[in-house]
Image (cartoon, rainbow, N blue to C red):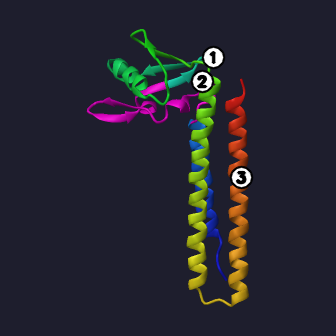
Amino acid sequence: MFDTNGVKAKMTAVVDRFKEEMKKVRTGRAHPDMLANVKAEVYGQYMPLNQIANITVQGATMLLITPYDMSNIEKISSAIRADQALGLNPADDGRVIRVPIPPLTEERRKEIVKTASGKVEESKVQLRQAREDARKDIKGMELAEDAKKRAEKAVDDMIHEFNTEIDKLFAEKEAEIMRI
């Protein structure tokens, strides 16, 4: 009998990665994960902001960044400003960095949805790859034909379930992005 637990674990990992990617997508509200991909060059290497500063939300449209080492404040500001995908303009007062989150235009919202839909497709490709790997494993096993068919159907049902979950997560995120 074919063990579907390994396939399910791979597909669950794909969905988990997708959820993490969706957390990083900008929705018009301030969220610390917006800066998750920003890295500043400090101490001779590039480090994620969450390792060199405390990032908090101040109101719905403002991020407040407090560096652990005040000598890094300019480097952190520059790193945020340099990330063109974010389009943010931080301001520092020597102790903290305030990052106002400008309201999204309709055009920018559609652009963000388009980028997010690309992540949907990437995740679905990964799911299909997991299904193909499982099918190869099934074909290579010494099983009766009907057992192979049942195993393939179980894998197909799983991929359908995970695709539906990704579509549902994306629909929720799209509604959140397009909400004014």
- Report helix, strand or loop for mark 3: helix
| Figure quadrant of the C terminus | top right
Residue drawn at the location 71% of the way across and 81% of the way down: 149
Residue receiving disc 2:
30
The mark that comes first in sequence, 1 or 3, is: 1
Residue at the farthest left position: 44
Judge whether residue 74 can be spotted in this image: yes
The residue wearing badge 3 is: 165
- Sort mark 1 into few (<14), some (14-19) or many (20+) by Cα contacts within 10 Å: few
Q: Residue at x 68, y 63 (%)?
A: 159
Q: Amino acid at mark 2?
A: Ala
Residue 125 placed where, x, y %? 57, 58
Examine the rendered structure and indicate whether residue 115 appears above or below residue 143.
above
Q: Are marks 3 and 2 in contact (CB under 8 Å)?
A: no
Circle 1 SS class: loop
| x and y, in percent, of residue 114 in the image | 60, 39
Mark nearer the N terminus (1 vs 2): 2
Q: Which mark is residue 59?
A: 1
**Does residue 45 show up magenta in the picture?**
yes
Q: Quadrant of the N terminus?
A: bottom right
Q: Is residue 20 magenta?
A: no
Tell me where the magenta segment starts and ends, as one range. Answer: 25-54
When the figure is inspected, residue 78 is found, relative to residue 174, above or below; the finding is above
Location of residue 128 in the rendering, given as x and y in whole percent from the top left corner = 60, 64
Q: Nearer the viewer, residue 115 or 37?
A: 115
Query: Is the C-beta separation of discs 1 and 2 under 8 Å?
Result: yes
Nearer to me, 176 or 7? 176
Q: Amino acid at mark 1?
A: Gly
Give the alpha-carbon distance from disc 1 to disc 3, as whole Å: 31 Å
Residue 96 shows in this picture: no
Q: Position of residue 76 (x, y in %)?
A: 39, 23
